[in-house]
Amino acid sequence: MKTFAELDAKICSCTEALNSKIDGSNGKRAILLCGGTGCLSSNSMDIKARFEQLVAEHNMGDKVTVNIVGCFGFCSQGPFVKIYPEDTLYRLVKVDDVEEIFNTDIVGGQIVERLLYIEPLTDEKVVKQDDINFYKKQKRIALHGCGVINPEDINEAMGEGAFQGLKRALSMEPKEVIDEVLAAGLRGRGGAGFPTGRKWSFAYANEADQKYVVCNGDEGDPGAFMDRSILEGNPFAVLEGMMIAGYAIGATEGYFYVRAEYPIAVNRLRMAIKQMKEAGILGENIMGTGFSFQAYIRLGAGAFVCGEETALLNSIEGKRGMPRPRPPFPAVKGLWQKPTIVNNVETLACVPYILREGAEAFASCGTEKSKGTKVFALGGKVNNVGLVEIPMGTTLRELIYDIGGGIPNGKKFKAIQTGGPSGGCLTAESLDEPIDFDNLVAKGSMMGSGGAIVMDEDNCMVDVAKFYMEFICDESCGKCSPCRIGTKRMLEILTRITEGNGTMQDLEELEELGSAVKANSLCALGQTAANPIISTLTHFKEEYLAHIVDKKCPAKVCKKLIQYTIEQDNCFGCGLCARACPVGCIQRTDYKAPDKKLNSYQIDSSKCIKCGACMATCKFKAIVQK
């Protein structure tokens, strides 16, 4: 394709083909399978192969198509199989279920009810995806096309609107493109929430013989997989966003920095680059406009600190991934000392929507200061684990209970950690707070890249703070001493507290160290390292006091503060616990409980390693934690 007219014609034909697949006007049934990492790890490709085998055996190749698509988002219910045009969604599908689906639904036209999703609160079976509560309050902008198109097929991407935003951008002046993004109110989805249009304008204003756009795909927060799913589900959208950014600031080259642990995302990104080059949408003199752009991929080795933009730039240049002092900022001197903008995957995925639908359409969603949507990886103690995209301003209660389906097993909600290791815990008092950049910060947490870990009454908040501090210590690059030394000292204090050796002075030292590390660290890793400690101290100080004063862990998580005992009146003297104990600390006693035939057992606490094997083995629930 060399002209806009040719592109328009191609988009038109692709749109018609995709729509006919969805509504069945092409006379075929379409079987779609989730091709995200989670479902692929649960044999999604084997399920696909079995469907293809059955289609061939029944000579139905002219009546049935089988395709993979991007992530459906509802990860705890995968693998998924979706059938068009009926829009039937089957979940938790196994290879052994394929023949039943094929014979009952594809051949017989009847729904396999046992594979339908069941709402946990009403026990209602749901046939269509959009009727499931998990999806009802979502709005897909960054995840546009995920779960609908084959991410390895540029034609399906065009059918879902790909490159219409690029076409419009290339018909505008670069400054007009920046103004459109500013008007939309798009803020960086990587964590800081800096206005994207302002960042672009800084690079636009700096004259240079070369400028760069860098896509930050180095997603490192524990439990986060937003960027991975976007790249796996619609890499064309992210590429289009990068090209629009390049045109706006005057850059002709872009780099994707993606961690090597995302092989599926990397492979699909490579395929997208190749297909776009072959189509004439990427490369030299695109659509005869005089605009040229090349895209390259660089793999990260998994260092969390390389999510910080200057450390990332060092890594691309072949240097050690350590942050640079700022100023100068990358928009002035970035990659190879040239003006560079660094946007994360989700930010760039929103850009085509803004140019395609207009700034007003994007800005109409969200809050006054936080426009659009945000993708969250919802995990932890919640029924519906998965990837969700919600309008800014959605409350935490809606996220956890309406979309997340509430807390499993009737447990009580305790806290939600947003922002990963850089964020903080929010309690039940904040459940009705709207989710946006500024509000979360005001409540002592932050948006971050979009991790959201729900905790219930069985979580120990001191142990949670220790977990995140262990992560920070492992991932600190060590360049600046406040982060390198300060985080290590905070971890030592938390370890003492969880082992029952803490003192009241430790709490004062934690707060002092946290303030010092925040004020003096070079990059955001150290500057936010104490956030989990500060937020848990603020909301759950009584748990710290229980560990220090009472030498007990209320949630019974910290091993060295747990004591296993046998209630001898309930012990039947079977000896199963003694045989299960790996260190032989359980012995028979002379005591025989009333109405029991055998002598009971007791645990020698001085030898007990707190493994819990005895409690798991006891059939009579005679062993308890104290």
Image (tube, rainbow, N blue to C red):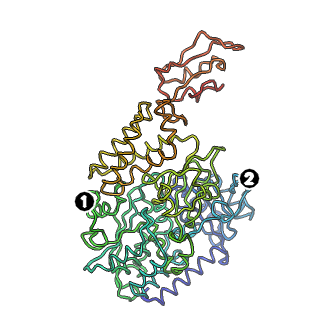
Mark 1 lies on a secondary structure that is loop
- Quarter of the figure with residue 72: bottom right
Q: Earlier in the sequence, mark 2 or mark 1?
A: 2
Residue to which mark 2 is pinned: 123
Closer to us: 504 or 347:
504
Q: Work out whether 554 lies above or below 17.
A: above
Q: Name above or below for residue 228 compared with residue 616.
A: below
Quadrant where the C terminus is found in the figure:
top right
Q: Residue at x 74, y 65 (%)?
A: 109
Instruction: From the top left corner, tell me how far across and down residue 576 is, in percent.
Output: 59, 22
Outermost residue toward the top? 590
In the image, taking residue 488 as reference, residue 389 lies left or right, namely right
Instruction: Tell me, for residue 319, which label it has, or none.
Output: 1
- Judge whether residue 302 can be spotted in this image: no
Amino acid at the residue labelled 1:
Lys
Few, some or many C-alpha atoms within 10 Å of disc 1 (few <14, some 14-19, many ≥20)?
few
Q: Quadrant of residue 146?
A: bottom right
User: Which residue is more in the foreground, 134 or 18?
Assistant: 134
Residue 543 in sight here: yes
**Label 2, label 1: how far apart the Cα atoms are:** 55 Å
Q: Is residue 301 left or right of residue 395?
A: left
Camera-side residue: 157 or 419? 419
State the quadrant of the N terminus: bottom left
94 shown above or below 270: above
x then y, percent, for residue 619: 64, 26
User: Residue type at mark 2?
Assistant: Asp
Residue at figure coordinates x 49%, y 69% from the top left: 234
Residue 432, how many percent across, how many down?
61, 58
Q: Secondary structure at mark 2?
A: loop
Near mark 2 (Cα within 10 A), the count class, few <14, some 14-19 or many ≥20, is few
* Residue nearest the viewer, comparing 331 with 239: 331
Rendered location of residue 490, percent (x, y): 37, 42
